[in-house]
Amino acid sequence: MTLLSVENITKRFGGLAALEEVSLSVQAGEIYGLIGPNGAGKTTLFNCMTGLYTATSGVVRLEDVEVQALKPHQIVKRGFARTFQNIRLFANMSALENVMVGRHARTHASVIGAVLRCRKTRAEEAGIRERAQELLRYVGLANKSRSLASHLSYGDQRRLEIARALATEPRLLALDEPVAGMNPNERGRMGELFRKLREGGVTLLLIEHDVKLVMGLCDRVAVLDYGRKIAEGRAEEVRNDPAVIAAYLGGEA
Amino acid sequence: MNRVLEPLRARPLLAFALLAALLAALPFLVGAGLGNSWVRVLDFALLYVLLAIGLNIVVGYAGLLDLGYIAFYALGAYLYAWLASPHFGLHLPFWAVLPIGAAFAGLFGVLLGAPTLRLRGDYLAIVTLGFGEIIRIFMNNLNAPFNLTNGPQGMNLIDPVKLGGLSFGKTLHFHGLTLPSTYLYYYLFLAFTLLAMFVALRLRDSRIGRAWAAIREDEIAAAAMGINTRDMKLLAFAMGATFGGLAGGLFAAFQGFISPESFTLWESILVLCMIVLGGMGNIPGVILGAVLLTVIPEALRYIGDLQRATLGHVVVDPSDLRMLLFGTALVAMMLFRPAGLLPSRQRKREFAAEDGVAAQEQSSLYDTKA
């Protein structure tokens, strides 16, 4: 079943075309990799899909519903969450509070509920806290729940961002360079986390530079270069594609 | 200090009872010790606390810099005057007028918020500053062609608060106890202030408060967490404005007279200074700031008398001195306690200097400042 399909997305910034006619589709339950050299338009594509940018033209469908005109918060509500390349945690909140914010989309307390703190609100609040603790445990930050996000190590910040995104109950989770700057050991553990996520029923879409990780982890891969998709397919097919080799190593294909 | 506070911390009920007794006895203590005019100062301090709690929702919680906050105070006050004074011959009861005034101001909060949603920081400050001035200038000029506000002369003979048979405008004799009007208003304002405090604290520790804090920290990340940033910002504006309108209505009833002069830019800045000085985002800090900045200028009036008594004439005008001290206090605060006198836990962290290479490296990874 196709969970996400992107059709002919074009994004121009003035005269510069950051994305040109890019199409791809992600199947439910797979780990889909998006790779490409720096400046290829990977993050731009993420931003177009998650509502941060409005694409110049093209369609993004989440399970047959067009979402390209929706606001970021509406897309999150539909089950599509993301993380950011340059970690965007709420730096001065604790790890737990960060994840609690992620529960916003799935909870309902209004001003009146918050002020009166009736039984329903109290139950909801307890639920938020409990679920946030659970998610911290899930990504391996159980003992850091009270630490300030900005005081966590780099790898832990990446994990926390994933926990926060998971708090929105996504069916599809888009990770923008989740292992950038990590050592091989940490990368291996992140890879395990991704597999665990998939087993838990979350479809993953990830931007990654580390070809080894992508090849070992992803079911299918798309390659972007200069805003165009130059290849798509199973990891080993893509690896031997002459256009991909040219894009990464330079020279004529 | 700690030896006094520690036993109280262990017995919150006792501390609560002591505080309640102190607040109840305060006008009598102040009235007996310093005279009735100081009870009036106390009343104004409470009004400013109410304003500061309202502005704190906008600035302290949601991080939206609002320099025109006093406009909502003005709207609440004028609405009270329209509905309860001889100006239009309407004399609605205060329990009806006050909520209408608060809602009216809240509506204007949304109206101001809507076009400024895309603005942040400096730009938002400029637009809100303009809004504050527009309201004041309207009030100044809407005496023709149709006399809505009576222009710069202001509106007079506004009804005092009446509750059942009790008029807050007159001295009450009750079982041998004499309660002048200022005392009665003290208790009324205290009740509203406590209510505002309660609402503000409950909001802070809720899903809504977390959403505001998230928007303040990083609006894009907040949106990516499913927070409707537009609605949440409008809600912050509306809530803040509602408190402002409420305070305005109380002000009109208390004074019996309002004019545009009470709602200048200076007042907006004063309220903002209260929350900055006290500690943005933290209710006890905000209250402290509001009380200090209302009481200290009044206390400085005595310096004029002191000069006359010792030197024979006034060398330095107390009102000049007020500004000087005010400025010095703010500079000193920025140097020594940049997050305010009683900062919130979170604000303290935001202002804390990050030291150590690791911390610097980490902070450079965030682009929340962009």
Image (tube, coloured by chain):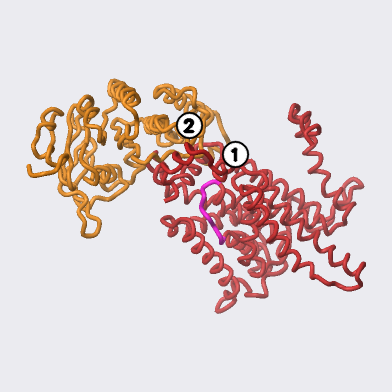
Chain colours: A orange, B red
Residue B93 visible from this viewpoint:
no
Q: Where is residue A30 drawn, in percent x and y?
A: 22, 27
Q: Which residue matches tag 1?
A: B345
Q: Which mark is residue A116?
A: none
Question: Magenta span covers which residues?
Answer: B61-68
Q: Identify the residue shown where x is 49% and y is 44%.
A: B212
Q: Where is residue A1 drawn, in percent x and y?
A: 18, 29
Position of B61 with respect to A69 (left or right) is right
Magenta segment main secondary structure: loop
Q: Where is residue B143 drawn, in percent x and y?
A: 59, 76
Report the quarter where the N terminus of chain B lies.
top right
Type of the residue with mark 2: Ala
Q: Which residue matches tag 2?
A: A95
In this view, A197 is above or below B192 = above
Are dots 1 and 2 on a single chain? Answer: no
Q: Regarding mark 1 in the picture, which secondary structure is present there?
A: helix
